[in-house]
Image: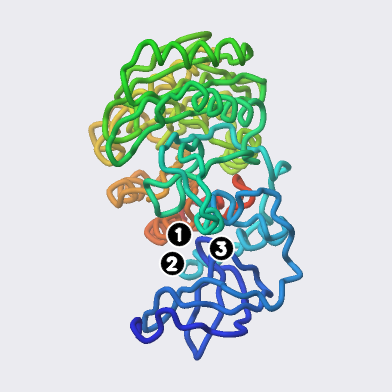
Amino acid sequence: MSRKMKNKVINNLQIERIAAEGKCVAHYEGKVVFVNNVAPGDVVDVRVTRGKNSFMEGEAIVFHELSKERVDPFCSHFGTCGGCKWQHINYELQKSYKRQQVIDQFTRIAKVDTPEVLPIIGSNKTQYYRNKLDFTFSNNRWLTREEINSGETFEKNALGFHIPKMFDKIIDIEHCYLQGGLSNEIRNKLRDFALKESLSFYDIRNQNGLLRNLIIRTTSIGETMVIVQFGEDNPNQIELVMQFLKHNFPSITSLLYIINIKKNETYHDLEVNTYQGKDYIEEKMEDLKFRIGPKSFYQTNSEQAYELYKVAREFAELTGEEIVYDLYTGTGTIANFVAKRAKSVIGIEYVEAAIEDAKLNSKVNGLDNTSFFAGDMKDILNDEFLKNHPKPDVIITDPPRAGMHEDVVNMLLRLEAPKIVYVSCNPATQARDLALLAEKYKIDKIQPVDMFPQTYHVENVVRLTLKS
């Protein structure tokens, strides 16, 4: 079927609804058609890009009717950047589809009895809500078809985001609506300065070039961290760049740089150099302070992280007498957030540097009832660990997108904690794990939280109680 259908044009296709991963769904001759960058209610001509026996994928090439649910995208980079794929859909509809995504995944994958999914907690901010963005320098700027066909010569250096599915193409960003504060000004002025000084932008294919990556982190109390990643160890040019940032942006709280001559942009194994200010920034949540270092994980939507953690704490129903296990604790944000309402909290996390941050955050906040352990969850949470630590009354687990390892799920079944609060950024893997936990647990509450407006991503919190 794929050979017959590829490049076939399907005329006047009615887009029906949004499905998983933000794609929209239509039907043609009894088969499902997935289409990107459309909205429910659109009538379009679709060119098939991939065909299988049970479904097809395609791209809209002609719009005959536009959905009433559409809104005008606010970003000039919409449709190319790939970062905010739902800008053309009104926010109320976005929220309803995210809630429906949770329902669909639980129905299709978990296949267990569930209570009604609660109304999704929306974000007050639908723009400028992220506290961290990574920008990439490149000597291979993405050119639009119009630019290519014009025959004109364009600047090939760029500072922005990767084009989806193209590791070596970068779209040059003029204004990003994801992060407020100094973010846009820092990026644009640094790019213009680099062009003026003829500094080399990174060539990812040949693995050379001075300017490689720019990371900007902000907090709700007005602190800013800027990290410049250099692909060459050139002291004079590094000094030139860092002096420019220091003098033009004196309000930067933490100005850092990294020399990275590896073949990838990860820097968790590299030295971070403090050029100006502190080597961390601080965030506040209720009466707690959290230190965020250059290698620290912190939820990228600070305001909604607070809403998410409030749900987790509410679901845990702590009285001050409970032993709490916080699995995949990261820098201990949830552990420290619930500590004042628990007898003690034990946090476990794979990344050792994150555990050091977690301990530091407990110390900064005067919490003496937390303890943290570093190691692979499936290896550290074993019989030996349980011999040396009290059994949990409540388990809070917030795993990565891949969900929990089966060994971890089996250990939770053995532990038989009266309550489990499962926080997830991927309802599909969460549903898979819940199907396994259903052997001994029933689901009490399901609360989706929108952390990322204009995208299809959704966080979800579930409370499970041990069956009697």
In which quadrant of the rendered view does residue 296 lie?
A: top left
Q: Position of residue 411 (x, y in %)?
A: 31, 46
Distance from disc 3 to disc 2, alpha carbons, whole Å, reads 12 Å
Badge 3 or badge 1: first in the primary sequence: 3
Give amino acid for label 1. Ala
Q: Position of residue 338 (x, y in %)?
A: 56, 29
Q: Which mark is residue 109?
A: 2
Q: What's the colour scheme?
A: rainbow
Secondary element at image label 2: helix
Badge 1 or badge 2: first in the primary sequence: 2
Q: Nearer the viewer, mark 3 or mark 2?
A: 3
Tag 3 residue = 101
Secondary element at image label 1: helix
Drawn side of residue 176 relative to residue 31, left or right: right
Q: Which mark is residue 264?
A: none
Give the residue displayed 28% in from the left and 34% down from the top. 207
Tag 1 residue = 428
